[in-house]
Amino acid sequence: MTQASQRRSLLSAHPELLLGIRRGIEKEGLRVDGEGTLAKTPHPVALGAALTHPHITTDYSESLLELVTSPLPSTEELVGQLRDIHTFVALRNPNEAIWNQSMPCHLPAEADIPVAWYGTSNTGMLKHVYRQGLAWRYGKVMQCIAGVHYNFSLPEAAWDFLTTGDTAQARRNTGYMGLIRNFMRHSWLLMYLFGASPAMSRSFLQRTGLESHLSKLSPDTYCLPWATSLRMSDLGYKNPSQSELHLCYNDLDTFTARIHTAVTTPWPAYEAIGTHRDGQRIQLNTNILQIENEYYATIRPKQTAGRCERPNTILHQRGIQYIEVRCMDIDPWEPAGIAEDTCRFLDAFLLFCALEDSPMFPAPGTCQESQGNFATVAREGRRPGLQLSREGQSIALSDWAAETLARIAPYAALLDEQTTRTAHQASIQAQLAKVKDVSLTPSARLLTALQDSGQEFHQWTLAQSQAHWAALQARGLSAQTLAQYDKAAQDSLAEQAELEAAPAESFENYVARFHAALLAA
């Protein structure tokens, strides 16, 4: 019996540990008007305060909603709550829709893309200035790309069976870093199976200077013919200065030490921008990263941070609480942007990553081979006969995908042991069908839909988004659930008002205190 099989047997003998798995979703989406153009209206008051609402906030832009679930014990509850949040937004903001695609809608002039506003409290201003800094560094257009983030955690006691270490926190950190390494080895598979952004509007390309890199599908639609996810490719959102970073995924201490270096090391191009213009702060600092969250990665180790706490400091002090998968495209066929079946597969995939042996990466602690495979599949994952690299040897994507799905299957069966259904195992079969028939992948389906309908990317996505919006409004919410969301919105507005009314230090002092909270890792 392999070590992985032994770990599965231990979890099977302790079903409470599997029942203790928690998963959550953060789903981004642009608000658009009836023509599919970015809405320039303020964050709707009926949705509450973006600063303090637990489920409805904004990401980069005032128009980029981020809908956040609670950590929940089942995929059914998870997607159910995400649909409820979407439904509430549709009911309380009926004249706009959420653009249900990762690549952006038609955008206004760069200067007219509104940066998210969180009010006048120091906490709110810190979030706003950070986003202003992103605009100065990378431009506003790239910040309008959207995705789905999937959060996953195992209960503390599970790591006692799965890893070794002197303390519970050490065992937890070791386990999650091993999960992250295995995720990076196999994340190319997620791009093939779920990448759903092979095309985009010409207007986005013109804004970014990328028009010559793609093929013209129709007058307003450009694509890469074999791409799975332009969002996650080298044509999507990238941070050029981060190419200088060499993060280590072998242990948490080295990881946090290198993040600390990135948020404390000046970068010449950002020094040239400066921190103030016309007496107003325009970025938090001139370092490679203003804050830790600026680091762009497909997966992150996470710990819940409070106001004025630094994520890197508390990650180092308290350890990893959960992991955040950041590479999932929005599913344009799902009203909430992700299907239950996708969530079931992700649970089995992440459990596989957690329990399988996870050798250390070579120095400096990253895996160039894995990064190369991911980039290749994002850009040309459906190319017939595509070869990837596994431990220096060439292997067909189709062969490696089928082999990996076979290895994940026992983890799906393990999750199904806790239910009366075989839904997790069915999710494996659904993905295997995509490996056998590339036309079933979301990226291929999207290109086929555009060609069959004769519509432009913008027209097709707008029609999908509006149909989802109408379906959500027709779905409705119970009076009790609607009242609960209304109350949460009102409570969040009151909490923001209370923050703004309280005595406060100057914003410059607050920023200095925020920087001082970054302890050396």
Image: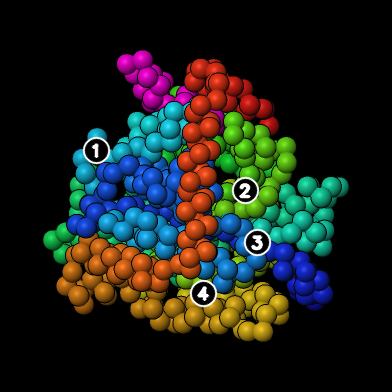
The mark closer to the camera, 3 or 2, is 3
Tag 4: Cα neighbours inside 10 Å, few (<14), some, or many (≥20)? some
- Secondary structure beneath dot 1 equals helix
Can you identify the residue that label 1 sits on?
Answer: 112
Residue 406 lies in quadrant: bottom right
Tag 3: Cα neighbours inside 10 Å, few (<14), some, or many (≥20)? many
Tell me, for residue 22, which label it has, or none: 3
First in sequence: mark 4 or mark 3? 3
First in sequence: mark 4 or mark 1? 1
- Secondary structure beneath dot 3 equals strand
The mark closer to the camera, 4 or 1, is 1
The mark closer to the camera, 1 or 2, is 1
In depth, the one of 36 and 201 nearer the eye is 36
- Secondary structure beneath dot 2 equals strand
Horizontally, is 388 left or right of 76 in the view? left
Tell me, for residue 301, which label it has, or none: 2
Q: Position of residue 275 (x, y in %)?
A: 41, 20
Can you identify the residue that label 4 sits on?
Answer: 341
Horizontally, is 1 left or right of 267 in the view? right
Q: Position of residue 10 (x, y in %)?
A: 81, 71
Residue at 56% x, 40% y: name it.
246
- Secondary structure beneath dot 4 equals helix
Question: Which quadrant holds the C terminus?
Answer: top right
Q: Position of residue 64 (x, y in %)?
A: 37, 48
In depth, the one of 261 and 49 nearer the eye is 49
